[in-house]
Amino acid sequence: MDNATRTKKITKVGTVVSDAMDKTVVVRVESVVMHKLYHRFVQRARKFAAHDEANDCKVGDKVQIMECRPISRSKRFRVVRVIERAS
């Protein structure tokens, strides 16, 4: 299979909220959606467990995660890069 027919992987940007596990971080991804009834913008947030092979992400870091094959029961994403370090 060449790169032209390969599916595009989903990437998301979020903030690390937990790094207590080994090689795993929990990333909170926020999005803004339109409310069906009230037609106002509402903030939604969802948490994803992501694989962090190097264990270099800390709480508060802004990271980019990418969809990948299932690594464990809860991990379907991996950390691609750290966009901004926590101060």
Image (spheres, rainbow, N blue to C red):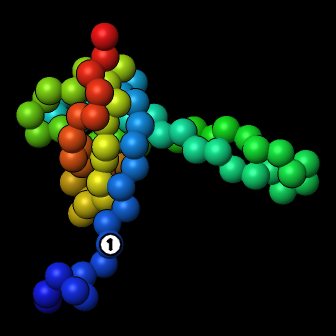
Report the residue at 17% width, 82% height from top: 3
How far across and down, in percent of the image, does residue 57 sit?
A: 21, 27
Report the residue at 31% width, 17% height from top: 86
As drawn, 6 above or below 10? below
Quarter containing the N terminus: bottom left
Left or right of residue 8: residue 43: right
Left or right of residue 86: residue 54: left
How far across and down, in percent of the image, does residue 53 sit?
A: 11, 39
Left or right of residue 7: residue 37: right
Report the residue at 76% width, 52% height from top: 34
Give, as a three-letter code, the residue at label 1.
Lys
How far across and down, in percent of the image, does residue 6 sit?
A: 24, 81
Residue 32 appears in the picture as rendered: yes
Name the residue that disc number 1 marks: 8
The quadrant holding residue 50 is: top left
**SS at mark 1 in the image:** loop
Residue 20 appears in the picture as rendered: no
Residue that extends furthest to the right in the rendered view of this protein: 38
Quarter containing the C terminus: top left
Residue that extends furthest to the top in the rendered view of this protein: 87
As drawn, 1 above or below 72? below
How far across and down, in percent of the image, does residue 62 sit?
A: 34, 30
